[in-house]
Amino acid sequence: MILCFLCFIFVVSFSADDGNKIYIGLSYPAFFDDEIEFGKGFELAIETINHSGGIKGRELEAVFIDDEAAVAEGMKVAHAFIQDKRILTVIGHFNSRVAVVTSKIYNDAKMPFIAPCSTAPDLMREDYTTVFRTIPDDKRVMAYLLNFLKGEGYEKIAVYYADDDFGKGVVKSVEDSADELGLEVVDRTTVINSANIERVLSRWNALDAEVLVVAETYEWVKDIIKEIKKRNPKLLVVGTSSLDFPEYISYLGEYAEGTIIPTHYELNKSTKLNMDFVEAFQEKYHSDPDMYAAIAYDTLMLFKEAAENTSALTKEQIVKALGEIRDKKCVTGTLSCENGEFIGDNILLKMVINGEFVFVENIRSSDTY
């Protein structure tokens, strides 16, 4: 488990700082280390930064606290980081329901906060001055996805979503984009289980639903997707990047076929930056990095870029420098900060074809598609 590495590297301590290190707060659900490469991405980035001389000659260290994917625990973590005077910036809170709540706590305390995986549009607010995000939000991703679906001739959409900030944000984004594109959202539901799945599928069939947008985390929804595809193999399942888990195909097997998932990282991208990242990751962990590793790595490199361009390492200067980043070459793409959002060329679609993920951009002209 990567958590073992994290416990070794990320010191959870509130003793006085000797002034020689730069400390950041890092929080996400530790149990994710058994499922995705998020923690490894942070670990590799810190190691890379420190091996290249640190930031302004000072070593970077992360103080890690597990938020357990729970709002109450996330609030405790946020207050702990704010009380720790060493912490210069906080990165994390993977789940939107946690990040949306904690972002207000950080902003009120004037603590720089970078959310690498919260996609809920409501994370960013006009009155926030210290909150940043390094992943595209659901509004942008759903607009991109629905535009693709319209181009392929699909018209009627059902949505299955989590009853939380993340799910509600996706539903609104789908509805807004559908209205703009002339598509129809024929049904929305937050509940599918063994007792009602036949009724739900019958309703979708009566409504001529062609596409199901899934707005729920992979662990919660993987078995539901399997049951839906067993009963209605013709229904096109599309998701958010929350379905971009390494085991998606191996777990769902034949029922994964045809799924379209937005992603924000291309493993085989031929930039030198990405090839160096992949090589370093493979050498250290003997496996390929996933999307979450790449986003984690980029987030820390964006923090490094900002910190190195400050006149003094203060929270105020970090906020200013983050907001001024433009055209930064990253592993996931070229990113610029616009009103706290790091925006760039990092929205891609991939589809399961013959048991493998293939980027839609690579197969549009193929006979296979």
Image (spheres, helix red, strand yellow):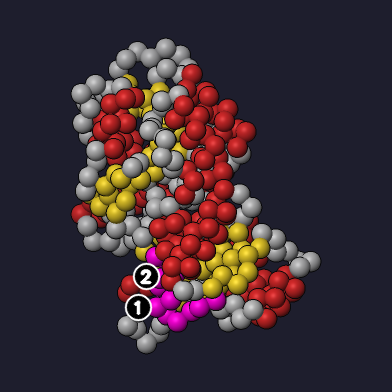
Q: What amino acid is found at the position of numbered circle 1 in the picture?
A: Ile
Whether residue 347 is in magenta: the answer is: no
Q: Position of residue 29 (x, y in %)?
A: 55, 40
* Disc 2 secondary structure class: strand
Q: Position of residue 120 (x, y in %)?
A: 49, 49
Which residue position is annotated with label 2? 359
Between residue 294 and residue 107, name the one nearer to us: 107
Q: In this view, does 188 lie to the left or right of 138?
A: right
- The answer to whether any part of residue 17 appears in the image is yes
* Disc 1 secondary structure class: helix
Residue at the image position 29 percent from the left and 58 percent from the top:
345
Considering the whole magenta stretch, tell me its main secondary structure.
helix
Magenta-drawn segment: 144-156
Whether residue 147 is in magenta: the answer is: yes
- The answer to whether any part of residue 251 appears in the image is no
Q: Where is residue 260 in the image (x, y as percent from the top left)?
A: 47, 70
Between residue 14 and residue 200, name the one nearer to us: 200
Residue at the image position 49 percent from the left and 59 percent from the top:
173
User: Which residue is the extreme one toward the right?
Assistant: 195
Tell me the crowding category of disc 2: few under 14, some 14 to 19, or many 20 or more residues within 10 angstroms, Cα based: some
Tell me the crowding category of disc 1: few under 14, some 14 to 19, or many 20 or more residues within 10 angstroms, Cα based: some
Quadrant occupied by the C terminus: bottom left
Between residue 20 and residue 285, name the one nearer to us: 20
Q: What amino acid is found at the position of numbered circle 2 in the picture?
A: Phe
Residue at the image position 39 percent from the left and 53 percent from the top:
136
The numbered dot on residue 103 is: none
> Are the residues tagged 2 and 1 within 8 Å (C-beta)?
yes
Q: Is residue 218 above or below residue 72?
A: below
The numbered dot on residue 363 is: 1
Q: Where is residue 282 in the image (x, y as percent from the top left)?
A: 34, 52
